Image: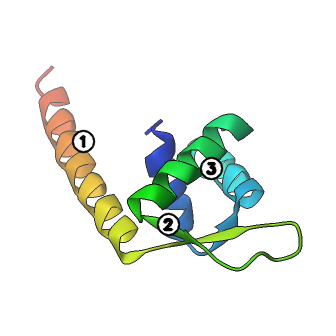
Amino acid sequence: MNDPTLLLLASLAEGDKHGYAMMEDIQRFAHRRLRPGTLYGAITRLEQRGWIAPLGPRGRRQPYTLTSGGRAYLEQQVAGMERILKTAARRLKHA
């Protein structure tokens, strides 16, 4: 999973985070380092789609939360990936 959209939604599914905390979380679970331009571009797109929402600023940091629409989209994508992985695993047994 390399799509910044899915990575950010997966990070926020654990709880509210600001940008740097999302970058660190994604590095830990996906072993992928998002650059600031990629991260904040994805945050902007997710906000525009209504999948994440900003919480009030906390000092210099702006935390975000996953919306119900973002959760539904992430669940849909995860289900699709699970189908693909099950098919691939089944086919590998015959390779």
Q: Would you identify the image quadrant in which residue 38 lies?
A: top right
Q: Would you say the residues marked 1 and 3 are in contact, meaning their CB atoms lie under 8 Å apart?
A: no
Three-letter code for the amino acid on which mark 2 is drawn: Ile
* Count of numbered tags: 3
**Circle 2 crowding by C-alpha within 10 Å: few under 14, some 14–19, many from 20:** many
**Circle 3 crowding by C-alpha within 10 Å: few under 14, some 14–19, many from 20:** some
Question: Quadrant of the image for the C terminus?
Answer: top left
Indicate the position of residue 7 as horizontal and vertical percent values: 51, 49
Three-letter code for the amino acid on which mark 3 is drawn: Ile
Indicate the position of residue 34 as horizontal and vertical percent values: 66, 38
Q: Secondary structure at mark 3?
A: helix
Residue 85 badge = 1
Residue 39 badge = none
Q: Would you identify the image quadrant in which residue 91 lies?
A: top left
- Closer to the camera, 2 or 58? 58
Q: Residue at x 62, y 74 (%)?
A: 16
Tell which residue pokes out farthest to the top in this image. Answer: 95
Side of 30 where 79 appears, left or right: left
Q: What separation in Å lies between label 1 and label 3 (alpha carbons)?
A: 21 Å
Q: What separation in Å lies between label 3 and label 2 (alpha carbons)?
A: 16 Å
- Closer to the camera, 44 or 86? 44
> Where is mark 2, residue-wise?
52
Q: Nearer the viewer, mark 1 or mark 3?
A: 3
Tell which residue pokes out farthest to the front in this image. Answer: 48
Could you tell me if residue 33 is visible in this image?
no
> Where is mark 3, residue-wise?
26
Indicate the position of residue 15 as horizontal and vertical percent values: 58, 75
Could you tell me if residue 74 is visible in this image?
yes
Question: Quadrant of the image for the N terminus?
Answer: top left
Q: Earlier in the sequence, mark 1 or mark 3?
A: 3
Q: Residue at x 48, y 49 (%)?
A: 45
